[in-house]
Image (cartoon, rainbow, N blue to C red):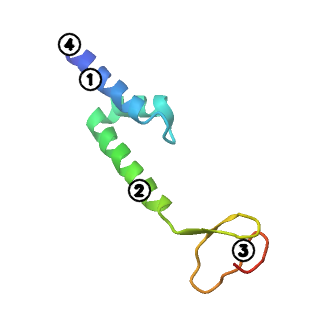
Amino acid sequence: MLIVVYLVLCLAVALAGRRGRIGFIGYFVLSIVFTPLAMLVFLIVSRWDQKRKSRKRTDICDHCEHEIRAMSEKRHCAHCGRPM
């Protein structure tokens, strides 16, 4: 019975991480090897890091509508070269 509970927890972690880099199978196998709790902590930390990285400030070019990372001094589009 304990093995069934362990595998169900592994499946739950794998379902939570199915859209991650290593996917469903990767999270399932690693949660079997390293315990579901360790992989759940890893999953939470990696998603937190992705959210933190995605908060970088970006601007949109008025001419070509290309997304540009905001720069302090240089205000030209790297895609079309026009000033913003």
Label 2, label 4: how many angstroms apart (C-alpha)? 36 Å
- The image quarter containing residue 9 is top left
| Residue sitting at x 47%, y 30% | 24
Q: Is residue 67 above or below residue 6?
A: below
Left or right, 38 with respect to 18, comes to left
Task: Write down the residue under mark 3.
Answer: 77
Earlier along the polypeptide chain: callout 2 or callout 4? Answer: 4
- Label 3 or label 2, whichever lies nearer to me, is 3
Query: Where does the N terminus fall, quadrant-wise?
Result: top left
Is residue 35 visible in the rendered image? The answer is no
Q: Could you tell me the amino acid type at mark 2?
A: Asp
Identify the element where label 1 is drawn: helix
Is residue 79 visible in the rendered image? The answer is yes
Q: Is residue 7 above or below residue 52?
A: above
Residue 75: assigned label:
none
- Label 1 or label 3, whichever lies nearer to me, is 3
The crowding category of the residue bearing disc 1, from other C-alpha atoms within 10 Å (few below 14, some 14 to 19, many at least 20), is some
Q: Could you tell me the amino acid type at mark 1?
A: Tyr
Estimate the x, y position of residue 50 in percent, counting from the top left.
Answer: 45, 54
The crowding category of the residue bearing disc 3, from other C-alpha atoms within 10 Å (few below 14, some 14 to 19, many at least 20), is many
